[in-house]
Image (spheres, rainbow, N blue to C red):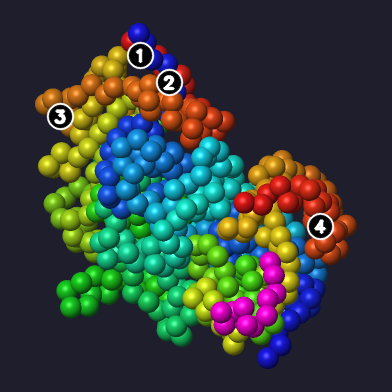
Amino acid sequence: MSTTFTESEFMIAQCARLMKDGETAFIGYGMPQIAAILAQMYHAPDLVQLYEFGAIGPQPSTPFVRLTMGGPSNCFRSLAWTNMNTIFAQAGAGYLDVGILGASQIDLYGNVNSTVIGDYEHPKRRFPGSGGGNEVASLCWRTIVIIMHEKRRFVEKVDFITSPGFLDGSEGARERAGLPRDTAPYRVVTSRALLGYAPNRRMQLLGVLRGFTVDEILAEMGFAPEVADDVVTLEPPTADELHLLRDVIDPSEAVIGRGTVLEVA
Amino acid sequence: MDKLATLSQAAELVRDGDVLAISGSFFESVPMALIREVIRQGKRDLKIIVSAHGIAVDILVGAGCVREVSGAYIGFEGYGLAPNFRRAVEQGTLEFNESACFAISSGLRAAAWGLPFLPIKGLFGSDLLLRHAEYKPYTWDGEEVMLVPALKPTVALVHGRRADSAGNVQIAGAGWDEVIAEAADRVIVTVEEIVPEEEIRRTPERTTFPGFLTTAVAEAPYGAHPAGSPGLYDFDEAHVLEYLEAGKTSDGFRSYLNRYVYEAPTHDQYLEAAGGVKRIFALRI
């Protein structure tokens, strides 16, 4: 029996599977929010979501149709309402296990651009600002980036380093720059694949969505990542995950409806 | 000391050229009634300091009140770009001084504590540093920190849940409102409800900042609309979508301002224009 799902549904389910029960997770807006709600409902009831405006541990009300992280429904049933200084300071003090961000561009060493495409002063495209993305990638122990699997997004070198990955990729580059020791980029969840980082800090292909080949994945990247010896097959969202996403969390498909529809046998 | 004011008196405390900080986030605890009154009063040349905000900044920019914005994100998240903000930046009529949320909120925190700067972690290795020569790396006992200078607003616009007439303010929800109240020279507050002092004394654990910080306080029920107020009412998504549709063109936005600001000269008239009691009440949580 085949499964039909959108690229967003796949990315959200993949990302949710990376969230662990009991962890503290700094959540950016959009797909990361939906993934956190799914994880909380599915396997990680004690996942503590944190939002930069200061909400700690909310259980966002569902259906979650709102396209914002700064609204009352997103702060619903919080454990605490604090403020931006508190959340970032907690991240800086090492209390946040994982940060989850969207991105416009990412490079071989996991540096993220969410500021501008092209030159800053004469941009091809300028985004509305990166919010707290820099601090999330700087201060959380591990950073997960969610990004569509498109060649133009995976570039050898990002046009602008908004949020640091392994910077120039040399050993100890983050620490030398002044970032907290042992913090690092962790995973990249795409609409086709799952990537991590090899010991040489280059991005590394770890998994491929069922029905796609490694070559097909690599052909849609602007650089050649390392490839793990044992690239795993990533399963599509399960019936349970799709039920929660479609019937409980986002029935209006505001977030899960994005991207093309995939069918996997 | 009595700090009670009408909405109009409160907004008159904003002067042309002021540096504004604004409470709340995208769609909660935004001092929208106060902002609409600032627009009606035709304030000009304002500078705004925010971390991440949307409609609060966009409507002021669209009404021609703003010269410069310092911020980390101005937009409507999943709803799209901030139409007036984008137009003004593209046309070169507005300066956008772009930074990161923690750097800005820490600059405000420094001002709140009367300090010239605060050390923070973060920003290292980012190209954002290329645009901010004023951020200075510093090594303290082997540990690297980034020094970010104080950001001093002259005025904080705040919408809270309730206050007494002395301006002791209680705000529900996540936010940074006590930080901007401590940082600013003048603090202009609207609340959903003015309550007796006794009510504040009964619940001091809920007080966000004390009356000696407050310059003026005005009652404005549903004063965050079309944003929401945590625990009381949700934000008005349909109105926000109408705003974004109107904002697609300058003319469309002018019609929006006419309908909801200039031709609704009081907050009560605004609430009528925005759908009246029935629709507003439907937003209650």
Mark 2 chain: A
Q: Which residues are magenta?
A: B192-202
Where residue A244 appears, as percent x and y from the top left, is 43, 30
Measured in 3D between alpha carbons, the distance from the residue under mark 4 to the one under mark 1, in whole angstroms, is 52 Å
Residue A264: numbered disc: 1
Amino acid type of the residue that numbered disc 3 sits on in the rendered structure: Ala
Instruction: Tell me which label, 3 or 2, sits earlier in the chain.
Output: 2
Amino acid type of the residue that numbered disc 4 sits on in the rendered structure: Tyr
Image-based side of B100 in relation to B41, left or right: left
Amino acid type of the residue that numbered disc 1 sits on in the rendered structure: Val
Residue B270: numbered disc: 4
Q: Nearer the viewer, residue B211 or A134?
A: B211
Where residue A145 appears, as percent x and y from the top left, is 34, 41
Residue picked out by circle 2: A5
User: Do the residues at discs 3 and 2 belong to one chain?
Assistant: yes
Give the residue at x 43% y 20%.
A5
Image-based side of B218 in relation to B120, left or right: right
Measured in 3D between alpha carbons, the distance from the residue under mark 3 to the one under mark 2, in whole angstroms, is 26 Å
Amino acid type of the residue that numbered disc 2 sits on in the rendered structure: Phe
